[in-house]
Every structure is written in structure tokens, then in C-alpha cells.
Image (tube, grey):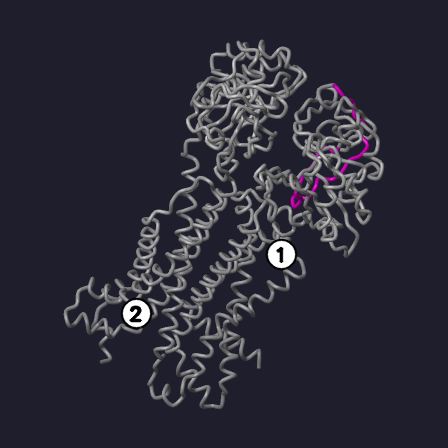
Amino acid sequence: MIRNYLKSAWRNIARHKFISFINIFGLTIGITCCLLILTYIINELSYDKYNANADRTYRVTRIFYSANGTESLHLSAVAPPFGPLLKTAFPDIEQVTRVYPNGTTILRYKDKLFNEQNGFFADEHFFDVFSVDVIKGDKHTALTDPYNVMLTEKIAHKYFGDEDPINKTITLDNTKHEYKVTGIFKPFPITAHMHPEILMSFNTLKDTAMYGEKQLETNYGNNSFFTYILLPKDYNADNISKQLNSFLDTYVHFPGMPGNVKTSTITKLTIQKLTDIHLRSHLDDEIEENGDIDRVYIFSIIALFILLIACINYMNLSTARSALRAREIGIRKVIGAQRKEIIRQFLSESVLITWIALLLAVSLTCVLLPYINTLSDLTLSVSSLLRWNILCGILALPFVIGLISGIYPALFMSSFKPVRVLKGIINVGSGGISFRKVLVVAQFAISIILIVATTVVFQQLRYIQQKSLGFNKDHILTTYYDQDINKQYDAFRNDLLRIPGIKQAGRSTRIPSGRLLDEQGASVMQNGALQQVKIDLKCLATDYGFIPTFGMHMAAGRNFSRDFATDTANYILNETAVKMLGWGDPRNAIDKDMVYGNTKGKIIGVVSDFHFESLHQKIVPMIFYMPSQSYYRCLSIKISGNNIPATISSIQSTWSKYLPKVPFDYGFLDQKFQQLYNSEQQQGSLFTIFSFIAIFIACLGLFGLSAFTITQRVKEIGVRKVLGASVPQIVAELSKSFLILVLIATVIAFPIAWYLMHKWLLDFASRIDIAWWVFVLAGVVALIIAFATISFQSIKAANANPVKSLRSE
């Protein structure tokens, strides 16, 4: 029986080649989109699940509250004492491990000298928590002793070539420390939330020259230590979460804090599942940029929408061609076929078509995936679809899609009365026509929503690129600042400024495009006494060259100067800070007394507001200070933009003169700002692709539907021409009903598109207003595309010789 159904289905596909082609092609494109998006979703959902202990590993995070009780900062790293304290306070915790990023690590072996960016200090319990393939060395002891180091295969080969690196010494931090190589490990998987390439023993930090054992035990201010806890199997993590407040109140008490104030009112600890970090964690200091669960949801919905459009094509064309198969159905019923057998026949046909589409889609996915990887900067692989649970779902697709797309046409056509259809009385029924109209409206509504989304995304991206940041980010070269140059910095800077292409140079602890995380308590003079302020002033250590390097403007007062020794105890605020402190005009802040941290000084200047962070964040109140002892981490150099290669070459020569043992690595600030919006750029590109695909599939169906409808109206067109109708009149008459459906689709799509994009824009502190013309543009584009699709068939029919179509009459 099944063989008979499939044979009959194949004959019908071959008999109606045009409609079968449209159905197969549309479903192929739809399923291909689904498979491509599925590889992306699988990739995103698989982060950190490679760890054997992933389901019971948690990261400890820390929340800070401002003086008014609102959350001001949520960090993914915590202070160093918390790890051992948690293990002591909660015996149920199986293991604790701490990881400390070293930032830029200078690594040298013989004549090979490089800046490495992925160096981490990790304790001896690291491998008890994380699954890492150690190729050489003993993972249980490799990180136990101070000044031990483990390298990835890539880093080991970079320095040692084919030599065995084990027990060889390598110099870190510019000849200061010799480290013994005790192990080689494989790189962390792409689907990890961190990717260390150098692991240094955590016990090294106990050396006072590095950090100090006492500091590790008592410093609650340096929240740079990523701390992970491993819980027993099937353990309820809430048992620990609920006790973290009392843990803080019992174990942690800050100097100078009143005895009646609980620590948990100032700061809190939380624990976060390891497998939630990539998609559900957007804290202020993530190790690497994370994904977003909302993006997974968005692309899942888009995939379903595109597949739905393809299924709608099948329904539309199948019900539209019902007149062609009416006699076949009538004859089948006369010779004894029951309705359920006819339904099975049509469903087998739709399943067969979907199987053909699936095979084509799999081939197309393999071809397109490398291009998608290039476009999105991802490393998606077809192999992710070969897991048994995913593969079973894919193999079930033809049956699911075949059932969804084929059930209505099967029910509709199996309901024909044999007596009527064999007499030539064929009426597809108003119900079928109305349903087809609903499906066309749904197709174009989805397409219009995607057009609006694409337009808004690119408008917002253009706004970000063109918006004034309050300073000039162009032609600013940034590089790591090495503390060894402190004593010679003035000479070094003067030599830089003698280079013709250099305008300014300045130092700071952070540079624009980064996050403002540092904050200390502030007090200002009010009513003759120092009063603690109830806002968080984010601090930035800068020198006298920082503000002129970035071309920032002083709203009042002056910049720091080398000519005033007291400037190391003075402050500069931004305009937002002045407003939030209640001083109004920036000039009112000048010469005000302020205590920040433990240093008392005066406010000497107010800088005009500028966007230090990305436009996702609001401008926050900031305070600038010039430290008496340099601990800058960044050097910024403003260049003219003329003959940039020669200028960079001169900078490198000057750098080598003062820092011969430190590699010169640099970047440009505008590129760093561009990287802040990589996610949105990728999203915009993918929206464009999917919008085009959705419109294309919808028009493909409309093309087939209009072609079939016009075929059914050939005699009507002939009569109209005989009676004097012109070609434009006939085209208008044939197109009118379809264009009305597109207009209805625009009315439905506009409010949905506005709501969705309004929600998306809320992620930006600085954002566009959605203009009315965006919706008009989307509607007009949809109408033009629909009309162009329909008119191709309409003009062809209108120009046909009416004699041929009326000959049988």
C-alpha cells in the first residue's frame, strides 16, 4: 500500500513539474535556513558543557550597592580571600579553584620575545574542576609549586619548536621571573567561556614581589579573581545561595565600617551555573564577550518563520491546483477509495516532496556553512548535527513538515463529491480561497516584519558610528604601558612628540571603549562638613596628557599639569557628576573640597560629558585623578593620520630605545569601538540575508499561485480583450486581489514590528527613534516586489491572443 502511495506521489510530482519545483525549491531554502540556524543554536547552547563537572560547577559573583541602596556593580570576579573562606564556611563544597588573569604577559625564551594576552594564574585545584586534556606533565602537581607554568601546544611550539619544553625555563614579565615548564595542555574548546593559553601556578602570587600572601588573605578590594566552586552530585545549590548573606556578615567586616552595619547591605555574593555564563551572564567584567539567549530565541523564531512561509507555499499551491486533480479524486472515490486513503495519498506526496527538499537542504548546508562562518566570525560545523538526538529530529522533519504542509490540502481535496466533479462541476469553495488569502497575508506580514527589523538595525548601527562621543577617537594609537619606563617617561614622551606625525600622548588606567569598574567612596563639603555622597563616582587615573590626547573639552576649570605638584591630590569631574552632586553649573564645582578614597583635594576642573563606554551604557558620573605613584596600564598616542606606517615605525624605534626587552604591540581606538558592536553588525547582516530569503520564498509562492490563478482565468482575459480592455487594465484587474492582501499584511505587520524593534532598542542607552518612513518603506518595498512578481504572469496573459483562449467556445 505504502509503495503504491509513493509511486502515485512520484507520478503527480512529475506530472505537475512547475508547481512541484516551486514547492521543493521553497522547502529546500526553508529547511536549509533551519539547519544553518540550528548549527548556531547548538553551538551557543553547548558552551562549557564539555566539562565533566559542568552541571555542578558554579562561579561566584559579587554585587556592590551604592549609598542609596541601588545595585551599582555586578562583577563576575571576586576578592581573593573569598575562595578559601567559602571552603571553610561550607563543608559541603567539594572543591574551590581560583583563576587570576594576568593581562598582557611578556614571554621570552632566548631570542623569542612576545606579548601574550591569555595568561592566567590558576591554583592546583584547577584540573579538579575543569576538564582539560594535559598532554605532558602531571596535572595533579604541575601547578603546585611557585613559578611553574603550563603552556598550550601552540604556545610551546611558538617558543620551543620541536624541542621538549618540559623542565625548560621561560622568562615572564620582562626578565623578572624564571618559570619552569611543567606541563603542556590542549587548547580549551571554542565552546568555553575562557581560553587560557598560559597557566601559571597560583602559589606564585604568595611571593611579596608578585602579590603577597597577606594580600591574598585580607584584600577584599581587588575583585579580579574568578572563583569557581564544585558541589556534590545532585546537591541543591540553593542551600548555599540562601546562606551567602549570613556568610558575609560572619566572615567579612571592612575597616571603618560601623558595628551595626551588616556587610550584606553593602555587598553580596551570588553563585552562577557554569553552563549559564555564556548565554545568561552579562556582568560588568566578563573574561570574554558572551553570547545572548535572546539572540538564540530571535534566530529560532526567524528559522520557524522562514520554514512556515515555505509550508504556506505548499498549502497554497496544493489547494489552488485542486481543480486539476478533482477528476482524479472523483474516480478514486467511485472505484471504492475511502476518504482516509485519499488523505494518506496526499500526505505521502507531501512527505516525499519534503524528503527531496531535506536531501537538497543538507547538501546546501554543507556548501553554505563556511560562508556563514566567515560572515559571522563563528566556527559552526555540520558535525554538530550528527548527534543522535539532533539527527533523529532532522530525520523526523519530512514527516512533521509533510504533515503540517499537507494536512490541509489533503483534508480539503479529499472532501470533493465524486458525482459533482465527474459532471465537471468543480468548486474549490470560498473556504479554500479564504484560507489561501490568510496564508498569503501571513507570509508577507512575516516578510515585512523582517524588512523593518533590518532597516532599524542598520539605522541604529549608523547612528552609533556617526554619533559624537564627546572626543575624537580617530587616529589614536593605544598600547600596553610598561611600568619600567616610569622614571624615564618624560624623556620618552618628549621623544615621541618630536616625531612629526605625533600630536599628543597620555597615560591612564583604562581607555575609552572599556568598562568603568573602579570606584571608591567619596565625600564633599556641605554645610561646613564633609558628607558622604550617595552616588557612585567611577574613577580613572590619568596624567596631564590624557585629556588633550583624546581632544576632550573642559567645561570649566583646567586640566592636570606638570607645573602643579599639588595636582596629585586634586580632581577633575565630568558634567554628569557635577549635576548628580547638585551643583548645576560646572563652574560651581571649581575649588570645592573633596575626599575620594582616603585622599583629600580640590576639584580643579570639569570635563564635558563623553561616552567612555559603549552606547549600550549611559554616561556615568566620573572622577579623574593623577596618582603620585604611577600604576598606569595604557598609553594613548594621537597621530596626525598622514603617512601612518612611517609614524608607527618611528614610534616603534622610540619604544625599542627605552624598552628594548618589551615587545611593541598596538591597536587603534576606532577599531576597539567598532568591536563593541560586532554582535549588532552580525545581527544586521543575518537579518538582511533572512529578510531576502523570506521575501524570496513568499514571492516564489505568489508567483506560482498567480500563474495558476491566471491560467484558470484565461477565457475571462480573452473575453475582456475582445470587449476592448487594454493590457494595463487587465494587469490591474489580475493584480488587484493579490496587492490588497499585501496591504492587509502591512497593517498587521507594522505594530508587531514596532513593538519588537522598540524592545531591541531598549538595550542601547543612546538610540534612535523609529521613524514613520521605515514602515512606509517596508510596505512599499513589499508591494513593489509583489507587483513585480504578479505582473510578470499578468502581462504575459494580457498580451496573449484571445482567439486561442476562446477557440473552444
From the image, tell me which residue sits under label 1: 385
Labelled disc at residue 322: none
Does residue 196 belong to the magenta stretch? yes
**Image position of 192 (left or right of 510):** right
Q: Which mark is residue 710?
A: 2
Q: Where are the magenta residues, as a range? A: 176-199
Measured as percent of width and height from the top left, residue 204 is found at 79, 28
Residue 160: where, in percent of width, then height?
75, 27
| x and y, in percent, of residue 569 in the image | 58, 17
- The type of residue carrying mark 1 is Leu
Asked if residue 332 is among those painted magenta in the image, a careful observer would answer no
Q: Quadrant of the N terminus?
A: bottom right
State the residue lying farthest toward the left. Answer: 724
Tell me: residue 265, above or below residue 170.
below
In the picture, measured across the screen, residue 793 lies left or right of residue 365, that is left
Coordinates of residue 494 in the picture (x, y in percent): 54, 10
Residue 795, by quadrant, is bottom left
State the residue at coordinates (61%, 21%). 599
> For the residue labelled by badge 1, is the local secondary structure a helix, a strand or a loop?
helix
Extreme residue in the front direction: 527
Badge 1 crowding class, 10 Å Cα cut-off, few under 14, some 14 to 19, many 20 or more, is some
The residue under label 2 is which amino acid type? Ile
- Which SS class for mark 2? helix
Residue shown at 41% from the left, 34% from the top:
467
